[in-house]
Every structure is written in structure tokens, then in C-alpha cells.
Amino acid sequence: MKAKVLDISGNVLREVELPAVFSEEFRPDLIKKAVLSLQSRRFQPKGASKLAGKDTSAESWGPGHGVSRVPRIKTGRRAARVPQAVGGRRAHPPKAEKEILKKINKKERWKALRSAIAATADPSLVRARGHKFSEDVSLPIVVENALVTLSKTADVEAFLKAVGIWEDVLRAKRKKVRAGRGKMRGRRYRRKKSVLFVISGDEMPAAEGKEEKEERKEEEEKRVGVSGVSEAETATFRAECEELAGCGCLPCRRFKCGTARTWNASGQTDRLDRRRNFKTRISTICVCYGVCGGEGFFRGTSGRNES
């Protein structure tokens, strides 16, 4: 069985031989059995309490009273404990120790997986599932490795339109409210399934190493400054510090290296970092903490000392 290899423009490049798994017979019975076995792993045990309906002091009156010999409450004639009585136990309640995991043979599970993969190459079976694609589309769709280099959504959209499966993506975009109690249990919406991209992993770009991360961090610090503020802003703060409180104390020396503490808008001390918005950063000046007897300055307000 062969498949056409397409480029990112939808043009045919060549043909390749598909793996033998795509020649497997279609076995919907095994596929359903495997799916149910997989879903049963999510089931939670449930059962009634062992004392449900039995937590009572009711006793039978015994023979000779002209009534049935069911247990009756001490303060009256009402029956209790037995299944036919109001508030009594259930005859066969659900038990938490019940085996709810649906098992499947190992060979059946693997055959079901191969059968499901082979079914994706049959257009009639895929359309029966509700998927929409052009008539000239041959399944499975095999694309060159250049597909993983697409970095923009518009490029991926153009590729899906060129291949002829964009209509199925739009079908999966819509969602509907789930019917029944499930909408109150964290699964309110239902959404259709659509295109699945399968890659080997060799086509992906190499992960960023430790050295690359350090180089990128150094470049980022050079661009925005050590404290997370732009270089121009840091230079402005440094000049004001030297002019107003440049007494050579420890806070002033720290400010020159970009780690000075500043008074923020609420009057508390904090470091210059990326979390401070521009308005707060531009309204603060390095504060001399009074170590050398100098005065602290805050733009637009009176000075403040810190002893």
C-alpha cells in the first residue's frame, strides 16, 4: 500500500510505501472492546455503607401476636431493618469491592490498536465518523518534514486549505453544551475531534541547551539592564541618585550596580524588577537609609529618612 508525499503547498512530491499496519483488517468489535477497557480505568468504586438501614434496635415480636414476625421499632409497631420496610436496608446494594475494571487480552488490545490505525486510511470509514474533507484527498496524508518549520498560524491554515481538510478543522471549532448531568461535573461542553499531526520527533528543532539559555539571558540583561529596567531609565535614575543622594553609602553603591532598593508608590521598599510598572519605576529614586546621615528623596513628596 502506497501513499503520496505532499509538500506544504499541497503538491505531490513522490510516493512512499506505507507500513504493514495499514493493511490490517477492520475489527470494530475489538476496537470497541479495547475502548471500553480503557474507559473502565476511570471508573470509581461506589457502594452503600455496611450499616445502611441496619442502624436500629428493632426486634421481632415473635409468634403469637397475630402480626408478621418482621423486626419492629421499640416505640411502636412500624417495621424496620428488612428490605420491604421504609428506611430498611437494600436487598442487593452496590458493593465497593466489585470488580469494575474490564479486562482485555494483550493480543486483542494490540490487534485493536493496529485495526484502528488501519481504519484511518479508509476514506469511507473516516467520513462515517463525521469528518469532512475533499473528494480528492487520499488517506493517510503524508507531508514532507518542512511542515514542522511553520511558525505562524496563517501558514498552517494555508497548508490545511491546500491539502483539503480545512473544513474539518472548522467543524471541530464549534462546541455544544453536553446533555445530562455531565454539564455539572466539569465536562460542560462537547467538542468534535479533527486533524491529528503525527511526527517522529526527529524533525523537531533541538532543545535549547544550558549554554544557549545563559547566552540568551546575558543578551536580555544587556538589552533591558540588570534590574529589569531599560538602560536609558537606569541611567536617569543613576544620575538623580548621584545628584541627590550620592553620598557613597551602601544603598547608593547598590543602586549603581542595579540592585538598589527604592520607595514604591505605597511607601514600601522594593527592588527594581520587571514586575514594577513604568509609572511606579519612573516615580522612584534611590533612598539613602540614613547609614551615613544623608536624606532620602521621593519625587513629588517630602523627603523620608530610614534609621
Image (tube, rainbow, N blue to C red):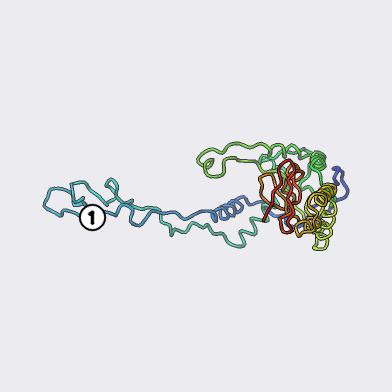
Numbered-mark total: 1
Measured from the top left, where is residue 136 in percent x and y?
A: 80, 39
Residue shown at the point (75%, 52%) measured from the top left: 198
Residue 290 falls in which quadrant of the image? Answer: bottom right
Measured from the top left, where is residue 126 in percent x and y?
A: 69, 43
Q: Residues within 10 Å of mark 1 (few under 14, many from 20)?
A: few
Measured from the top left, where is residue 291 in percent x and y?
A: 72, 59
Residue shown at the point (81%, 54%) measured from the top left: 246
Q: Amino acid at mark 1?
A: Ser
> Depth check: 136 or 49 in front?
49
Q: Secondary structure at mark 1?
A: loop
Which image quarter is the C terminus in?
Answer: bottom right
The residue indicated by pointer 1 is: 57
- Up-down relation of residue 210 to residue 63 (above or below): below
> Depth check: 248 or 132 in front?
248
- Please indicate whether residue 177 sits to the left or right of residue 72 in the image: right
- Please indicate whether residue 91 sits to the left or right of residue 304 in the image: left
